[in-house]
Image: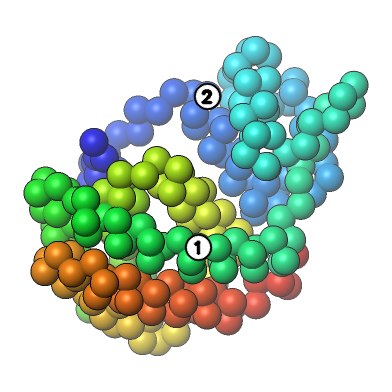
Amino acid sequence: MLSLDFLDNNYVDDRTPQEKAKEQIKIDILTRELRPGQRLIEQKLCERFGLSRPPLREIINQLASEGYVELIPKRGAFVNVFDSRMLDDLLNMRNLLYPQAVRWAIERITVDELEMLQETFGFIQFYTPTGDIPKLKKFTAGFDAIIYDSSKNRELNDILNKYDFIIEHTLHPQTYPVNYPETVLEEYRAIYEAFRTRNSSQGMEAAQVHAFRSMLRIKSFDYRSNS
């Protein structure tokens, strides 16, 4: 079952060194600390993360299977390009898949999961008037994580989590509209009300509105300048 311990201020990250290294390499690729086409130097990565070659090579193989790097025989692993066209496609795919996740989650959510969703929405309400956008984003991400898990569809869960990770680290805006917290709150309120009343059609409509507006907000930051 999904745990939201990471939302606690006292959360201790108990992931393995390999898991942490894999995530950081992915972030470095998305933020272009590792440039498109750059070759991954195993020895440098081993020294940086305190890993031996076997676990590092397993990480690189996983990154290749997820599309972050390309393996070229006898040459090594090279960073893939995340260009504006690919990111546009990703945003449009999320726009289609997010409402389906909400629909299935409303139909399949357990009592415990619904209580977690209610608690997380309460935090979204609490932080909205503070203007603390990092905290607000933390809890909206938690809200979405509950939805994905409650959809009881592993493939959809994995895909949406992957999309959200890429969006967070590739399309991270520097500024937000003045009314951003209030707008997001109302979008999530509409989704939460559909869960509370167990109305999957209403939830799907609210999710479509939120996903489409989120896509427009992200595109308004002109991420192409970083491509």
Q: Secondary structure at mark 1?
A: helix
User: Is residue 218 shown above or below 38?
Assistant: below
Give the labeled residue for mark 2: 18
Q: Residue visible at 14% across and 54% down?
A: 114
Query: To which quarter of the image does residue 43 belong?
Result: top right
Position of residue 11 relative to residue 133, above or below, is above
Question: Is residue 218 placed above or below 163 in the rendered structure?
Answer: below
**Dividing the picture into quarters, in which one does residue 40 lie?**
top right
- Name which residue type carries label 1: Arg
Instruction: Evaluate whether residue 196 shows in this view.
Output: yes
Q: How many numbered circles are shown?
A: 2
Residue occupying the far right of the picture: 74
> Could you tell me residue 142's position as x and y percent?
30, 54
User: What residue appears at the point 55 percent right and 63 percent down from the top-left corner?
Assistant: 93
Label 2: which secondary element: helix
Depth check: give the residue in front, 71 or 108.
Answer: 108
Instruction: Look at the numbered discs 2 and 1 and tell me whether their residues touch, using CB distance below 8 Å.
Output: no
Q: Tell which residue pokes out farthest to the bottom in this image.
A: 178
- Position of the C terminus by quadrant: bottom right
Q: How crowded is the residue under tag 1: few (<14 C-alpha within 10 Å), some, or many (20+)?
A: some
Q: CA distance from mark 2 to mark 1?
A: 28 Å
Look at the picture and state if 119 lies above or below 34. Answer: below
Residue named by callout 1: 94
The quadrant in which the N terminus is found is top left
Give the amino acid type for the residue marked by disc 2 in the picture.
Gln
In the image: residue 136, left or right of residue 62: left
